[in-house]
Image (cartoon, grey):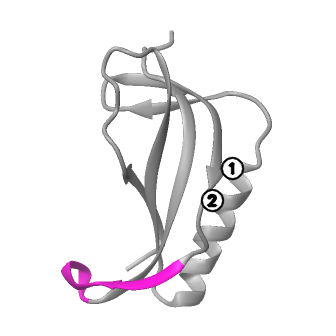
């Protein structure tokens, strides 16, 4: 096993025809131990403190992220589908451009 970060849909439904929108996402910080989960979470928090826009890979190509804010404190869970691998769960708020950028 190893450490990883999974970011997926959180609360609400995205507006399909809005170019720039705010979204809520769920981030899972996986690790072999709770301490490893904490290291992944620390890296995520560092990434959210980046000033300026950034491009990220998405299913359809590339999207533009304006900002990301961690909304919640990490909560420890164990993923039964991964042999009870621990993970920290946090919610993120982001403003993104859904249209692809070059």
Residue appearing at x 34%, y 44% in the figure: 12
Disc sitting over residue 23 in the figure: none
The tag on residue 48 is 1
**What is the distance, in whole Å, between disc 1 and disc 2 at their CAs?**
6 Å
Q: Are marks 1 and 2 in contact (CB under 8 Å)?
A: yes
Residue 13 in the image: state x and y as whole percent. 31, 38
Q: Looking at the picture, how far across and down is residue 53, in whole percent?
A: 69, 27
Query: Which quarter shows the N terminus?
Result: bottom left
Residue 42 lies in what quarter of the image? bottom right
Q: Which residue bears the numbered disc 2?
A: 44
Q: Please determine whether, in this image, residue 69 is positioned above or below residue 21.
A: below
Dividing the picture into quadrants, the one containing residue 83 is bottom left
Name the residue at the right extreme. Answer: 51
- State the extent of the magenta-drawn residues as a range: 75-83
76 to the left or right of 84? right
- The secondary element bearing badge 2 is classed as helix
Q: Give the x, y percent position of residue 92.
A: 54, 53
Specify whether residue 50 is painted magenta: no
Q: Is residue 95 left or right of residue 57?
A: right
Question: How packed is label 2: few (under 14 Cα within 10 Å), some, or many (20 or more)?
Answer: some
Q: Residue furthest left?
A: 81
Q: Residue at x 43, y 14 (%)?
A: 99
Observer-nearest of 21 and 41: 21
Q: Residue at x 25, y 80 (%)?
A: 82
In the depicted structure, whether residue 23 falls above or below residue 92 = above
Residue 99 to residue 6: above or below: above
Q: Residues within 10 Å of mark 1 (few under 14, many from 20)?
A: some
| Label 1: which secondary element | helix
Relative vertical location of residue 99 with respect to residue 93 in this rendering, above or below: above
Residue 76: within the magenta?
yes
């Amino acid at each position: 096993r190893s450490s990883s970060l999974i970011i997926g849909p959180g609360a609400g439904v995205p507006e399909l025809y809005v170019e720039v929108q705010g979204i809520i996402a769920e981030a899972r910080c996986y690790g072999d131990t709770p301490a490893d989960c904490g290291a992944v979470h620390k890296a995520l928090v560092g990434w959210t403190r980046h000033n300026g826009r950034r491009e990220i890979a998405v299913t359809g190509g590339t999207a533009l992220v304006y900002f990301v804010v961690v909304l919640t404190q990490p909560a420890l869970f164990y993923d039964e589908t991964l042999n009870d691998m621990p993970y920290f769960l946090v919610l993120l708020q982001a403003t993104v451009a859904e249209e692809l950028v070059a």
